[in-house]
Amino acid sequence: MHVYDKAYMDCRSKYLIPLTSYSVPYSRLRNTNIKNAILTKSTSIDINNDTEYEFCFDEDYLFKALLGEIELFYIRKNIQKADSVFCKGDGISANWNIVTNYYNAFFAASLMLRLCYRGNIFFDNRLRRQLEQMISNVTGSVRRLDSNQFYEVYEKNGKYVLKLTKSIDATHELVWRKMGGLINEMLMISRPGSDEWLILTAIKQINNGLNSTFPSQLRNRVNYQTLYGLEYVDKKLFQINENINWIRCLLNFEDTADDNQIACYMYAYTKYIECFCSNFIAEYYDIRGNENGILKTLNSNRSIKIEKEKPIFII
């Protein structure tokens, strides 16, 4: 199946290509991110309402911040993926197997959002006060902000701007809700009837049937409800593994309340996201014509190496 088709290529043109003019050294990742860009590099602020602000930047600073954010979550995603691979088989409880795989799914979704110029962001009390003071100085009136925010970068009047919006949802629910929105955007630009359209339609059906936040809800049940300890002892709880045909699982979705089956759908959904992210990362380094420096650094102190991404368009 040609899973990554027109919608992917449109995202590639819109989001990946502008990034390929930039790079961020590993040594600068701690300070090259969206938070620091907002607080130190913004050139102007427009207030849309009490919960929505637009920041303008010199384009170089903004794209380096976007790329730094992507690299940070790329590291988290790879580390979590390695843990989820380890946490499978008879030696690990089914409960922890599902929870660990959930975090792999969560960081993959967070990475995919950032590859498409958007993401959740949290300001601790110190940074939040700095942001409040900066906005208050511009507006001439006292402004109060929540720590949980969501950013999105887009073109406006020929320039890129960053919109910061108050997050109503908690972090995990927000990521899955925004992932559902991104899937819907991609579905609208995919070719009707194509393999890609079928996969995106299936993912939308899953989000509609189970609620777009279903991975987070599953994680909460397995992690926090004590009866799932009994489920493990009685061998009734699903062990996530790589024997699932994830495309078939997506295309054969049926609404269900069975957590074993819901775990399968979470795994299948994540495989789509992981391949999307791998394609983007692999193409970024291919276009730049150099090796994946982040992966090289990650592997420098690992006995089991993380393999280099290879574009996957036909499954």
Image (spheres, rainbow, N blue to C red):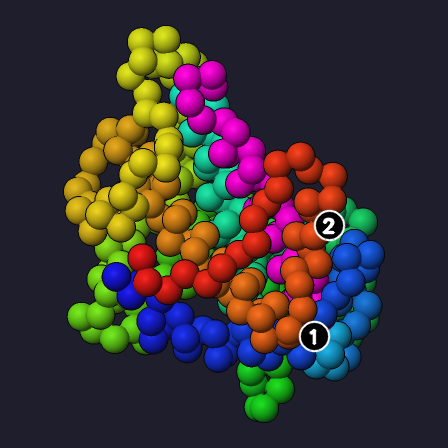
Position in image of residue 173 (x %, y %): 46, 45
What residue do we see at 25% from left, 75% from top? 191
Sequence-first tag of 1 and 2: 1
The quarter holding residue 314 reads bottom left
Position in image of residue 105 (x %, y %): 46, 44
Q: Is there CB contact under 8 Å for labels 1 and 2? A: no
What residue do we see at 22% from left, 70% from top? 194
| Vertical arrangement, residue 127 with respect to residue 257, above or below | below
| Vertical arrangement, residue 258 with respect to residue 38, above or below | above
Position in image of residue 77 (x %, y %): 57, 46
| Vertical arrangement, residue 54 with respect to residue 211, above or below | below
What residue do we see at 30% from left, 29% from top? 259
Camera-side residue: 44 or 229? 229
- The stretch of residues the image draws in magenta is 63-92
Q: Mark 1 is on which residue type?
A: Tyr
**Quadrant in the picture for the C terminus:** bottom left
- Residue topped by disc 1: 22
Residue 74 falls within the magenta-colored stretch = yes
Residue 267 at least partly seen: yes
On the rendered structure, is 125 left or right of 49?
A: right
Camera-side residue: 211 or 273? 273
Q: Nearer the viewer, mark 1 or mark 2?
A: 2
